[in-house]
Image: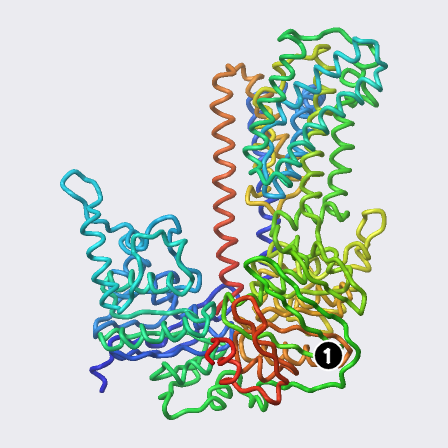
Amino acid sequence: MVNKDILLHNSRQFGTLIGLMIVTIVFWILSPYFLTVSNVMNIAEQTSINALIAVGMTFVIITAGIDLSVGSIVAVSGVVMAGALQGGLSDALGILVGLLIGVTCGLTNGLLISYGRLPPFIATLGMMSVARGAALFYTEGRPISGFSQGFRFLATGELAGIPAPVILMVVVYVIAHVVLKRTKLGRYTYAIGGNEEAANLSGVNTKMIKTIVYGISGLLSALAAVVLTARLNSAQPIAGMMYELDAIAAVVIGGTSLMGGEGKISGTLIGAFIMGILRNGLNLLGLSSFTQQIIIGSVIILAVLIDMGLRKDRRFTQAKGIIT
Amino acid sequence: MPDDIILSMRKIRKTFPGVLALDDVDFDLRRAEVHVLLGENGAGKSTLVKILSGAHRKAGGEVHLFGERIEIESPRQAQQLGIGIIYQELNLVPSLTAAENMFLGREKTTSLGLIDRKALRSSAQSILADLGLRLDYDRPVRDFGIAQQQMIEVAKALSLDAKILVMDEPTSALSETEIRQLFGTIRRLKAKGVAIIYISHRLEEIFEIGDRVTVLRDGKCVGTKNVAETSKSELVRMMVNRELKEQYPRQRPPMGEEVLRVQNLCRRGTLKNISFALRRGEILGIAGLMGSGRTELARALFGVDRIESGEIYVREKLQKITSPRSAIDLRIGFLTEDRKSQGLVLTLSVKENITLASLDALSRLGFINFRSEAREAGSYVKDLRIKTPGLGQRVLYLSGGNQQKVVLSKWLCSKSDIFIFDEPTRGIDVGSKVEIYQLMNRLTAEGVGIIMISSELPEILGMSDRIIVMRRNEIVGEMPAEQATQEKVMHYALGAS
């Protein structure tokens, strides 16, 4: 039974990896330009923003929650940071302001969910609107553009040919992986998603952990806003629209269960890359953004269908494990 | 009288990858009999029943129903064949009324296509009356207790014209009075000619309600006996293939100093002036009917529910227990009555469950020390003889007895020396029960104090050193175990004076 479980477990990871290989090969065949170094770097850079947000989303979804406010947090932390930078704050301080806004929004979500006992869907749906409104209010609906070279380096810079956002993404993924696998915070995150009541009765401060997890999601959304603003050289109050869906899709394609309690950060990275490759490849093929939406949506549905098929199998093994 | 036989299962075989779950099992059922299916966890009882209900497909063998060979391919088909199943987890829609639940999916409609409420209610009424049940079928199911919900399931099965009714551990969540009620209903069903397959762990019940009993062990049929011609010890021997000299092997160690004292604990609606003390080496049994406040007391002691007034002294020091964390820090461990929903994180591994309450001690700067964690967890797996293929196995796959040992390990790992056991052996097979009792013996010999809440009177009488009886949120009686009898405890619990 163990072997079966491990097999099933890894087959899920394996499945995601195979999916990644399939889309890569398909685009490679269809477009000779696809697998060039510059395009691969391009994909990694384009993926980095969604990938950063998806890390926080993975934490949230492992606790059996959801965060719909990430896109709006990108917008509000982006514009406030932009305002601070243009108001004369140093790059570092400006970025800090942006990150603080993101963390605050995230922690507010967490407090509402933990101590206010709101369902995550409702709390973050509210925040989605509030943060978006705040971004529009702050900018009066206009973008804030033009930043220093130093700030823009965060998006345009390179280290040994690797774009800065990609380096940032890799660092964040390594940290997130370590946190989930090796720390108490990570263990408690899984425990809460698996059985919140049992975790609470085992002395886990479930409310605090959940609050922290939503705070992480807010922080990483703000980090994504830094990269986005640096790349566009502009912070827009309408930035980050629908980002929550891309992030959720990356997490789910990566094999994290919406039921909570299981999931891997490496799966999310692969999921984010599948999304990024689809976008990039379909662009290269010259498909319109309308068609792209249809295809990407279908891929998400397909991925979850396959996942559920595997899960049914898992329930079967469960039944088998407890034969009475 | 072979023509009385309405169901006959011959040489039933079922395999799951790597496991032979049923090995040529024979089982038959007569009209109007209660046939008990007995066996330890993993013996194959549920698998056999699931083949009958169409939830599993058999790998070999034959099923004859009313003399005709049949193949049961789906739960729906089983239903149409007159086989009704009442699972441990009830399948009712909480927001719908009792009547609506009984006819869910088979509602009669008026000519306008709307549900014919009048017909619905009158059919519900006639079936309930038939069963001798008086309950308000217009109320949503969530308003009813578990016992009544079970009755609604029975009524639903009967409305489907069931000739065979399977009941999977129907009494596991019922109080003594509710069990009486259920047995009354079963007798009525028998009188109507319904045959009942009754799965239970509780030997006492077999002699009260059963006509015949079939024992399964490791997927094989050990034998079928007339209940009137067998004995408890024979059945236990058949189940475990070993004589259980003592079902309750309590050894009474010398008692030490007081570890816990509770004075005038109050919480509106759940606890009234609760006072008692617990000493090292003692098992204090708490008896009482369901809803008498036993579990609420445990929850208050463990800091899950706030107390409104009263004092708790732990090791002779007044303490404020405001959360499970503060209780754990005072070295209190709480084995909840419902392992799966409160005791374990089923998606986590054996190791991760064992250390869940002790990670502070096993980590530095937030990082878990995997090596000490594995060593610590491994020592409990070995010490308590938890049957698992490895520390990384998900607890989901362990049997009830082994799961309970994992919960126990969790509290040993957090160095508890005050244990609250709430229904420690519910849903656990006979062999593992004795193991749990022996662990309780060992704990008390090592100076641990145990509060044991149980609905099973023999367990209370057999294992406790002192017994407290609760009724309506109050302690109504206290006695040393030597002076206790089932009658005496029930007398207090029911408030019959």
Residue A259, above or below B122: above
Residue A17 appears in view = no
- Write the residue at 65% across / 18% down: A75
Q: Quadrant of residue B408?
A: bottom right
Say which of B352 and A160 sits in front: B352
Q: Quadrant of residue B341?
A: bottom right
Q: Position of residue A197 (x, y in %)?
A: 61, 53
B38 sits to left or right of B35:
right
Within 10 Å of disc 1 (Cα), the crowding (few <14, some 14-19, many 20+) is: many
The N terminus of chain B appears in which quarter of the rendering?
bottom left
- Write the residue at 80% across / 23% down: A96
Numbered disc 1: secondary structure:
helix
Q: Which residue bears the numbered disc 1?
A: B444
Q: Amino acid at mark 1?
A: Thr
A247 sits to left or right of B472:
right
Q: Position of residue B77 (x, y in %)?
A: 27, 59
Q: Position of residue B160 (x, y in %)?
A: 24, 61
